[in-house]
């Protein structure tokens, strides 16, 4: 990101540059009387050769107002900022340069079921979840970022609001609103559920967001962006003892507008309206559609949008939803439904919760690493994008799933290998070829590309065949490879044509990759 | 079994005894002109104090006709045999004594979803499948019987007719009809499917069953009976190159009547109308209902009856069906459907095919032992009865699933342990208590017994919790045990009441058993 700072008010404009898909930020002094969050407006208009975008800004505290903008094209841009925040209008211009480094632009849906960056580079979301990693101490945040890099996760789901839940009884480093929380010393692992969604004892002013909370969040989003990691931001969630999950419509609207004004311009932001929306007792279907409407109206970049279920799926065919963000509904059959969900919803299937590798008491948080990796492959070969999480007990009660920190399991080590395999798929992603009842076969989504390359990726899951017979085109030579998805090896298995047999090691978690030689 | 032999014809009757649920066999000489199988009739009537049963007999070759009868009560029985087989009627009597040894009578459905022997002893079918073990050489048959005993299987599924299929290209030791087969030297692993259901080159006379084939089969059934093993006899199946799967209605009827007359009186026989009935292209739904009708009319003991699917389930609500005999329809979720199927069909759920432990190329025959045992527990705790099978490649191509022989896998070693656990369940079996979303909890089927004993069996499948919290009645003390279903250990975990925590080893395949102390 590059920022354009205009801290001197309406005069003394500096000419600056920003990268395409970077962020221009115009900071101006303004009125501090009354409640600037509710009483004042600020809008920026950004005009380039190929776009003319008006966005809302926000009050950042200390008499400073900010407008942010992500240019989608190179070239010269003019801007003006106006609103009741100040008696003065401001105006200026800047130059948008070519992107540099790992800046490929925001991620978009392509080919109906897949993703690519704005510059066309395919993107295969293989993400993880650390709900409140940004609300941890600085050293743990740094540790989390190192872990994400090592594991090669390219997406992370996390919350804006603090989390109250099992293993999450502590106070966050900051609150999203001004005020003071209830006395949490009364909380125990046994009684915490009694406080979920309760407001008693909290003194928060929902008309006054806490800019420091959001500045810190944005710093974390930028750290992800530097590392090429998408930030799947969860705007609302039910794990709450501070009252943030049950604010009034008016307070919700202020919160949503504030969040959208602050975060929209970050190219790596994805919107997740909620985690387990169906557990938020005080919100109705109409509420979610209302927030979605706000988002569609106020995010000028149309960032990726979805909403995450506990039990019932949201209706993913809703037009504002860009991709499914699914928590599996069944304890046993999970990513294996990917191809059915693709068919049903006609959108990319991101499986943001297929249980977590770990050993806690809850069934959603104690599957073995082998089962996690198996679910990743089952989903990926079917043309979906499973997500990771980890919940291993430890004395410090620092669980990756919520706090980030250090990864302890086995599945994360195998994410990069799967990413390499997906990156070698011709085109933007896989779809399932209904080839055999007892294997899953992924082929390139694009039919012409599938035909041209002959690419096939067979996955055998927990099955342990000693061999498999193939019947391919007799006139075409295929390069065959045996992939051990657990041990992360790719073994050349020679050139074949027509009918041929491939010997396999008789172990679970094997795959076979064929491609025209 | 005890037999009553009357080999001297109508005169010189000997007074003999037979056990309750044993078998009386009356063998008489008769006419040999024409075709005795089709031209002659023989019926026996058996009258005791509490039953009066008429059964059909059969021609056993060499001028001998046989009538078999299983008495269901003790005491004196009179009998008469008549029919066109002979100009002479025969009559006599015998005494039925108390059963001895492991003779508990035939198995019946009890409590809607479970089984018990006629004497009331609960029976928990934990079976295996060796489709044509009886058609192997004598030494392999002996080996199979030893293996069954060692593994403690108490049921085995197998065919009357020979099997033509992958790994089953050889000729059987005998044929069910007089005649000669096609030249099987043309068969290879690659072309065998072209011969499935073909009749060309075979010369069998479907009006002349081969008594030697059936005598051998019966010897095998008796060997099972001696060992307390139920014989789940598959009367028809589609894996055929001899034409036995596509005979005319007339020939089918002769076959069915002959089989029923020969086998009904064996107390350990269960009827499986077909294996993968839906693959028998020449048979219709009306055919199956017709065979069922024949069976209901001609088997006076109402032995257990079912029919086994490949893909679509037969309508298990049909009144003649005593229990479901299910091949799982999904590659992933199998025994986990047990409770839904119980609800749907209202009958015992026997899962006679949930894939086989092994390493052959086919997805139905290459799951790991761990997955097989997991499926057994998932089904059993839900109040169903999963079945075993094994398909390990070897140089001799002797695969347990078809040929019997020696068990090579890991799952069979754990069947007896599960049987011990089931035998310790109060009453006749388990049902699932909808207790928790992330565990399966089995309780005694009988509600009063469940309440009285407080028995609960929690199973955690592939999940690996480090602990689980329980909330039981605060006024009752419970004995807790931790069961490692894979390592076959039961560890006392002390006495508890009210809310308590049980620490677990954080490994898959664990269970917890609670019972009032």
Image (cartoon, coloured by chain):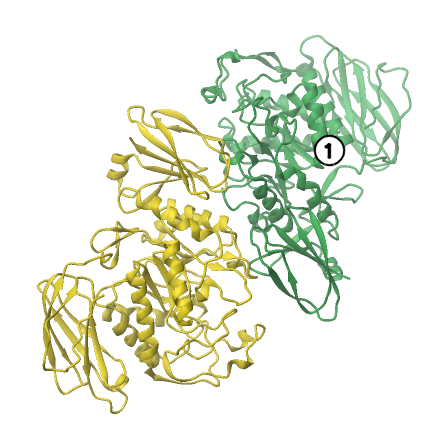
Chain colours: A green, B yellow
Image quarter of residue B282? bottom left
Q: Which residue is mark 1?
A: A149
Residue most extreme to the bottom: B33
Q: Nearer the viewer, residue B211 or A422?
A: B211
Question: Does B425 sit above or below residue B218?
Answer: above
The image shows residue A129 at horizontal and vertical percentages of: 62, 32
- How many residues crowd around disc 1 within 10 Å: few (fewer than 14), some, or many (20 or more)? some
Q: Nearer the viewer, residue A201 or B172?
A: B172
Image quarter of residue A373? top right
Q: Is residue A25 visible?
A: yes
Image quarter of residue B444? top left
The image shows residue A313 at horizontal and vertical percentages of: 53, 40
Q: Is residue A126 visible?
A: no
Position of residue B74 in the picture relative to residue B510 (left or right): left
The image shows residue A332 at horizontal and vertical percentages of: 50, 45
Q: Nearer the viewer, residue B160 or A367?
A: B160
The image shows residue B351 at horizontal and vertical percentages of: 40, 55
Position of residue B441 in the picture relative to residue A401 (left or right): left
Question: Does A381 sit above or below residue A501?
Answer: above
Residue most extreme to the top: A33
Position of residue A128 in the picture relative to residue B98 (left or right): right
Q: Nearer the viewer, residue B345 or A395?
A: A395
**What chain does badge 1 belong to?**
A
Q: Disc count in the image?
A: 1
Q: Quadrant of the C terminus of chain A?
A: bottom right
Question: Does B392 sit above or below residue A373?
Answer: below
Label 1 sits on a secondary structure element that is: helix
Residue most extreme to the front: B139
Question: Does A169 sit above or below residue B70?
Answer: above
């Amino acid at each position: 990101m590059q920022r354009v700072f205009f801290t001197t008010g309406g005069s003394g404009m500096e000419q600056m540059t920003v990268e395409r898909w970077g962020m221009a930020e115009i900071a101006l002094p303004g009125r501090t009387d009354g409640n600037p969050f509710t009483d004042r407006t600020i809008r920026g208009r950004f005009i380039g050769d190929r776009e003319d975008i008006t966005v809302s800004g926000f009050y950042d505290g200390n008499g400073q107002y900010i407008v942010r903008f992500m240019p989608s094209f190179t070239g010269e841009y003019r801007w003006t900022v106006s609103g009741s925040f100040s008696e003065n209008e401001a105006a200026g211009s800047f130059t948008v340069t070519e992107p540099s480094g790992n800046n490929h632009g925001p991620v978009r849906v392509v080919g109906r079921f897949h993703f690519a960056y704005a510059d066309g580079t395919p993107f295969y979301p293989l993400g993880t979840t650390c709900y409140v990693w940004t609300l941890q101490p600085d050293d743990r945040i740094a540790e989390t970022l190192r872990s994400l890099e090592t594991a090669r996760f390219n997406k992370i789901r996390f919350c804006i609001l603090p989390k109250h839940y099992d293993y999450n009884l502590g106070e966050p480093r900051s609150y999203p609103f001004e005020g003071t929380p209830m006395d949490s010393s009364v909380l125990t692992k046994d009684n915490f559920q009694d406080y979920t969604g309760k407001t008693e004892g909290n003194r928060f002013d929902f008309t006054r967001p806490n800019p420091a909370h959001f500045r810190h969040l944005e710093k974390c989003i930028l750290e992800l962006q530097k590392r090429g990691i998408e930030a799947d931001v969860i705007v609302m969630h039910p794990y709450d003892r501070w009252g943030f999950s049950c604010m009034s419509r008016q307070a919700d609207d202020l919160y949503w507008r504030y969040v959208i004004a602050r975060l929209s311009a970050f190219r790596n932001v994805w919107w997740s309206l909620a985690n387990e929306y169906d557990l938020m007792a005080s919100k109705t279907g109409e509420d979610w559609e209302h927030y979605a409407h706000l988002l569609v109206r106020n995010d000028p970049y149309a960032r990726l949008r979805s909403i995450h279920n506990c039990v019932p799926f949201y209706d993913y065919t809703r037009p504002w939803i860009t991709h499914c963000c699914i928590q599996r509904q069944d304890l046993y059959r999970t990513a294996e439904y990917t191809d059915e969900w693709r068919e049903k919803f006609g959108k990319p299937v991101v499986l943001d919760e297929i249980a977590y590798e770990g050993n806690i008491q809850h069934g959603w948080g104690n599957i073995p690493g082998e089962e996690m990796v198996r679910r990743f492959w089952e989903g990926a070969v079917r043309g979906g994008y499973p997500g990771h999480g980890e919940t291993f007990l430890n004395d410090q009660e620092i669980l990756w799933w919520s706090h980030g920190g250090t990864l302890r399991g086995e599945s994360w080590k195998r994410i990069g290998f799967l990413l390499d395999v997906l990156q070698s798929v011709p085109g933007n992603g896989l779809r399932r070829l209904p080839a055999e009842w007892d294997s899953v076969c992924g082929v390139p989504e694009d039919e012409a590309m599938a035909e041209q390359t002959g690419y096939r990726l067979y996955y055998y899951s927990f099955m342990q065949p000693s061999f498999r017979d193939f019947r391919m085109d007799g006139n075409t030579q295929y390069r065959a490879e045996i992939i051990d998805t657990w041990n992360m090896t790719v073994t050349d298995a020679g050139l074949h044509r027509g009918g041929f047999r491939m010997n396999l090691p008789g172990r679970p978690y094997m795959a076979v990759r064929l491609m025209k030689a």
